[in-house]
Image: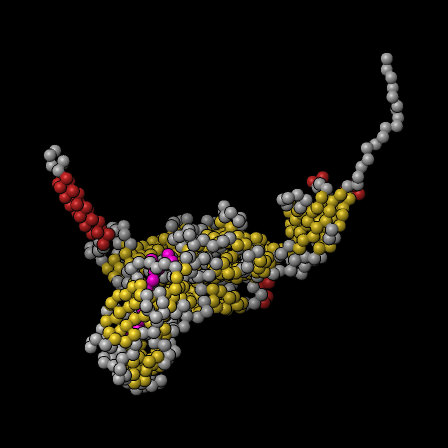
Amino acid sequence: MRLLNDTRFVVSSLILLILVFSSLLYRNLNYRFIDSTSPTIGVITFKNKTVLRKYNDAVVWDLIESKTEVKNRDTIRTEGLSDAILTLNDGTKINISENSMILLDISDKNININFAYGSFEAARGEGTVSGDLKMNITAGDKTVQVASGDVKLDKTKSELNIKVDQGEAKLTSNGKEETIAKDQIANVTDSGVKVGKPVFRLVSPEDRKNVLSESGSEKIQFVLSGWKPDSVKQSSPSLEISLFPDFSKSLIKEKLTAASVSKKLGAGSYYWRVLYEDPNSKTKQTTEVFQFRILSDPALRVLSPKPNEVFAYTGESPVVRFVWNPLDLYSSYTVQIAKDANFAEGLVSKQTQNQSLAFDSLKEGNYFAKIQAKSNLPGISEKSSTVVSFQILKKTSASPPELLEPARGKTFAEEQTKSQLFFSWKDDKDFNEYEWELSADSNFQNKLKSESTKNNFLKLPSGLGIGTYFWRVKGIGNSGNSLESKSNTFTVIAKEEMELISPANGSEVEVDERSTIILKWKKLTGKSNYEVEVSREPEFQRSVTKEAVTGNYFEFKSKDLGRFYWRVRSSGTDSDLSPVRSFQMISNMEPPSLATPTRNETIDLFTRTSILFTWKPVEKANAYRIRLMDISGIREKQVFSERTGSTKFQFSEIQKLNVGRFRWEVAALYKQSDGTERESAYNKQDFFVSVPELKVPKILTPGKIYVE
């Protein structure tokens, strides 16, 4: 008890416990379970991006790389835009697509694969696999058996699709066995199993095709075979493109009138298939599903050195640092330097996996350089940058330091100077020390700060007040001689306001069938992450969209037209909130021309039992929507909103109308490729409702009657 009252004992014990449990937690977090008892059944011969493996008795998923051994009863999982090729010991190749998971179990002289979800292919060509091993693929309560051949499986929540390219497979479902021959497709759903040879086959884009795009969007040509004009009329084929393998949401769905069609798509992963009606069985059928990707592949650009840049030195050779833009699809880069533009004389080459590389042994002279990028992904060839030239020049005397950041005339908010104000200048081997100076005047008579450093950069330890500042750097050589740079100026303001640029406040924006508007705002200095909020209400009680974005623009999409309100704030703070702006999305589709009632017409309810609204037809319109608004009071009230396929509408419930002013509106409805309807802008017209002034009737007879 006495020890428990001793502060030194209690504190020491607590510290010891913290250290013990911290070390145990660290070991647990960094522990990697290795199953040494299970036999090796294959090797990951190729992998792209994120591929995970879980051992049989483990609960933690581990990242795996190419050439990793796979143990028996391992589970392999791929994430988005990732895939892997697993080669089993008997020669079977398993190609696992993105967002897929399988469990492998080789026992009973069979290859057993538990297929959880996604898509994969198994190739067991004759002569390439050994022994009498059969492959059994289990997907829920269905089993697919493959002795030899190539088979592809796609599994979603509601269906399983099996395609046999070579050989044959046997499918067992609900106790029934079906044989799937070469070029046949089996579609398994809750309603049963359909096996048959498809009328149409997908040709292009091929399955797992990677389409490279410098602009971020590409026109894709969709081609299918089996197109016969006579059978097409009976089968009514439709193209379906989706972002989801189960086609739960269709991006494009439209009837085909030819064997090929072009669609412009942005970067991403897509699935496509063709729906049709079987001419013989008159049942709905689908082709196999192909996946393709549009990968953003911007040009490789050399950021440093600049074209014709001169690297001057007096003593040691200067450091020439090459910097280029990173490319997601490429894993290694090679910098090539030569004396001539054809890279034939004096070639120097270095490889790296980073986005920069330095050379410090180049002699005086003129040089040409380029960067080559290499990818591990199949079908992606090497990419080269444009050639840049630079010069290394030996001087008889040193040059003053060259200032980099902040550039001349740059502006900072007062709050930014507390954490984001860095000063940098070009490093020069002629100087072994630098002296940085900050002043409130250009003559540096009133120096505010001064610091010495051996680096070519400096972070201001404290903030600055509002005003204009001047800064410069002195380079100090080994002999003590110094050279002074030119001065740069920057300004500190109270606060940088968040400013919305486009669309203009209250403006009407005409949109096409994509219903997309680009929202732009002024980028705040030093801040790149923002939060965009769009609502139907100016008070933002409910948001239509609330997105975190990088950059100073946002692509807003909405199927519904009308007025929206938007605002932007810098991420992580509520102080940098923009004012609220509004815009109205209107359709570029032609609205109907209104006929009757005419503009400002007065309708006498005593002479009518109904009101007939008429308008002119619009070409390609599928239907129309008519609305009647009571605009007599302070607030508008909707009387009715109806859809009609005609160019006229008879309104008979005139008892709903009061004396006053009304507005009728009509929009054309256009059918989209996915089966939904889209409204045009509304044409609007006002009219008045009145009743004649009524006089109180005078009673003539009978007159007064007296009753006793």
Residue occupying image coordinates x 11% and y 34%: 2
Image position of 190 with respect to 85: above or below: above
Find residue 82 and report its horizontal and vertical position in percent: 36, 61
Examine the image and state in which quarter residue 489 appears.
bottom left
Q: Quadrant of residue 371?
A: bottom left
Q: Compared with residue 3, is residue 362 higher up or lower down, i.e. above or below?
A: below
Tell me which corner region of the image, top left, top right, bottom left or bottom right, holds residue 682: bottom right
Of residues 648 and 349, the one drawn nearer to the viewer in this rendering? 349
Looking at the image, the residue that sits furthest to the front is 445
**Which residue lies at the image location 69% right of the left edge and 47% below the top edge?**
662
Whether residue 241 is visible, yes or no, is no
Count of numbered badges drawn on the protein: 0
The span picked out in magenta is 414-428
Residue 636 to residue 437: above or below: above
Check residue 233 for magenta coloring.
no
Quadrant holding the C terminus: top right
Coordinates of residue 616 in the picture (x, y in percent): 71, 57
Which residue is drawn at the image coordinates 47% and 67% (left, top)? 217
